[in-house]
Amino acid sequence: MDTCVSAVQHLRRMRGGSQSHLLRASDGAHYVTKFMNNPQHVRVLANEMLATNLGLRLGLPMPRVEVIDVSDRLIENTDDLRVEVAGASIPCSSGRQLASLYAGGMATAGITFVAAHFDGSGDDGVTEEVKCYDSDAYAYEECEPVAHEASDLQEHFEALVPYGYENDAGGFGDVVLDVHKRKITVERNDRFEDYSTTTYEV
């Protein structure tokens, strides 16, 4: 990876055989972090990075991965930053580890919905920027978006926009992520042109 963020706070342990931990990073996002000395071997990190990057290139909706730098100081001052290996509890390794963006971080920030609206007329179609909301329900142009970084989801949401929605009179709709339910809904509405014909002799 070309980028690297720094871990600034340990939040909690995560479930699973790799014994990953949820960390808050220097960019404000939360990451599920797998350490080099995890009990499933270091190759787990390489496999996940390869699989995730391949999936992203194929347009699959997957969380991005980053390299995260975990300092000795954070590990030394965080009792829970440990892994169980061969019956022994040892500190997590410091330095560069593998981090996957945690969508649950949006819930922590109070985000309830993430949505992208698409609209087409004639042969043109436009997908708007992904926006975040803290409302009880989502309805386009009825809810005010809140400031929260979600640009990394743009490509994934666009991949879910229905094919051909811009044809004919043009369709419109929304790709909506319900953060709490962890469910994505795609709603498409099609416009139809109607006309009547009258024939008469003169």
Image (spheres, rainbow, N blue to C red):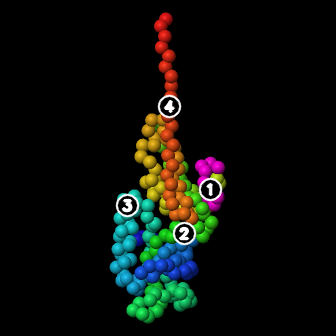
Labels 3 & 1 near each other (Cβ < 8 A): no
Q: Where does residue 43 sit, x and y in percent of width and height?
A: 34, 79
Within-10-Å neighbours for mark 4: few <14, some 14–19, many 20+: few
Cα distance, mark 3 to mark 2? 23 Å
Labels 4 & 1 near each other (Cβ < 8 A): no
Q: Where does residue 131 sit, x and y in percent of width and height?
A: 57, 56
Q: Amino acid at mark 3?
A: Arg
Specify the segment rendered in magenta: 133-142
Cα distance, mark 3 to mark 4? 38 Å
Mark 3 vs mark 4: in front: 4
Q: Is residue 111 magenta?
A: no
Q: Amino acid at mark 4?
A: Glu
Q: Which residue is mark 1?
A: 137
Cα distance, mark 3 to mark 1? 32 Å
Q: Does label 4 or label 2 sit earlier along the sequence?
A: 2
For the stretch drawn in magenta, what is the main secondary structure? Answer: loop
Q: Does label 3 or label 4 sit earlier along the sequence?
A: 3
Q: Toward the viewer: 17 or 131?
A: 17
The image quadrant of residue 60 is bottom left
Asked which secondary structure carries label 3, the reply is: helix
Determine if residue 130 is in view: no
Cα distance, mark 1 to mark 2? 18 Å
Q: Where does residue 122 sit, x and y in percent of width and height?
A: 47, 36
- Residue 193 has which mark? 4
Q: Amino acid at mark 1?
A: Ala
Asked which secondary structure carries label 1, the reply is: loop
Labels 3 & 4 near each other (Cβ < 8 A): no
Q: Which residue is mark 2?
A: 104
Q: Which residue is mark 3?
A: 57
